[in-house]
Amino acid sequence: MKKEFKEKVINAKTIAVYGESGSGKTALVYNLLRIFKSQNKTIYFLKHPKPKIIEKLGYENLMSIEAMEEIENAVIYIDEPQLHFGIYNKRSNSIISKICSLARQKSITVIMSTSDTRIFGKANESYFDLWLVKNLDYAMIKNGSKLKQILQDNCLFDPQGLVLKENEFLIDFRKYPKLNGKTTFKLVPEFTEEHSKPYSQYNKCEQEDEAEDEAEDEAEDEAEDEAIFLQKYPPKKYSPINETIEKFKHLCNSWTAKQIKLGNLILDKCEDCGSTENLITHHTNYSYPFKLKDIKIVCDDCHRKGKTHEFLKTNITLQLNNEQEVKCEKKLEKI
């Protein structure tokens, strides 16, 4: 590292370190920690899975981020924050913002390193004074993000072709822009493979909890969508044959929504008038198995005019008149 960078980095209160797994980002962090330790600052790791290996280096393990309120003039290192706060936890961005704000008030330097570019939203990017970037998959980074801008600023042509050596990294320092660019670092002697991958034996229970939270969020979204659908199209009393039709229609609408979400069906323009506004799907056939060719893209005006309703009505009637109600119910159970 350049001497000037070592002198200035101690002025940063919030540092973000990004890099793919195996890119050397943790080794880079240990270089930073050594610099701060030389300033007689206490170094804390948030919930390190192997406390003994950091205690040998004179670092301390912080069991809860709440303990940050009792700390001053120190450094807190949070490795892979998504393991502590969760990518899918709606409060994670708020937690990160509060951590950064509190750090400034209590003369604490917070260092966060991650391989997941989703952990910080645009609202949080402004909280970080210094960004240190190792190799990343450019195609996986959000458009308009700080990371994408850093990679674009450090290449002549195509950012996707930017490859850093193991001892290289990119600097983006808001307070000292003259330091921005590519530079190198040396491995500190105390850094070993054991320090490089502390989460190789990460608690499976915590991973399962994250998956469970994600599943609950998806279930809530589905329930909300269904509630909106039922509010717009409340259930009515039908004869047995019409009730079966409605069951088919409901299943077909759910299947259609999934096809739109997967990108298999694109609402680009009305097939009747060519309009690109207020587009919806219209089914010319509700028979199972459902097919994309039986879906027509129309605008709300054309749909209300009923240009295809007569064909739709005839088709359903013929479909169900040719089958017994018992067979129809069995088919519904299999869907």
Image (cartoon, rainbow, N blue to C red):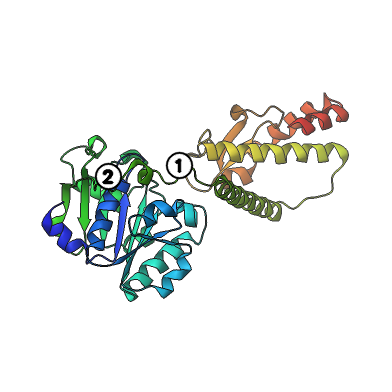
Label disc, if present, on residue 134 of the rendered structure: 2
Label disc, if present, on residue 200 of the rendered structure: 1
In which quarter of the view is residue 315 placed? top right
Residue 57 drawn at (x, y percent) = 33, 55
Q: Earlier in the sequence, mark 2 or mark 1?
A: 2
SS label for mark 1: loop
Q: Residue furthest top?
A: 322
Between 255 and 88, the one nearer to me in the picture: 88
Circle 1 crowding by C-alpha within 10 Å: few under 14, some 14–19, many from 20: few
Residue found 25% across the figure and 57% down from its top = 34
Q: Is residue 33 visible?
A: yes
In which quarter of the view is residue 124 placed? bottom left
The kind of residue on which mark 2 rests is Lys
Q: Is residue 102 above or below residue 247?
A: below
Between 200 and 194, the one nearer to me in the picture: 194
Say left or right for 85 vs 310: left
Q: Is residue 288 above or below residue 50?
A: above
Residue 240 drawn at (x, y percent) = 87, 39
Kindly report which numbered mark, 2 or 1, lies closer to the viewer in this rendering: 1
The kind of residue on which mark 1 rests is Ser
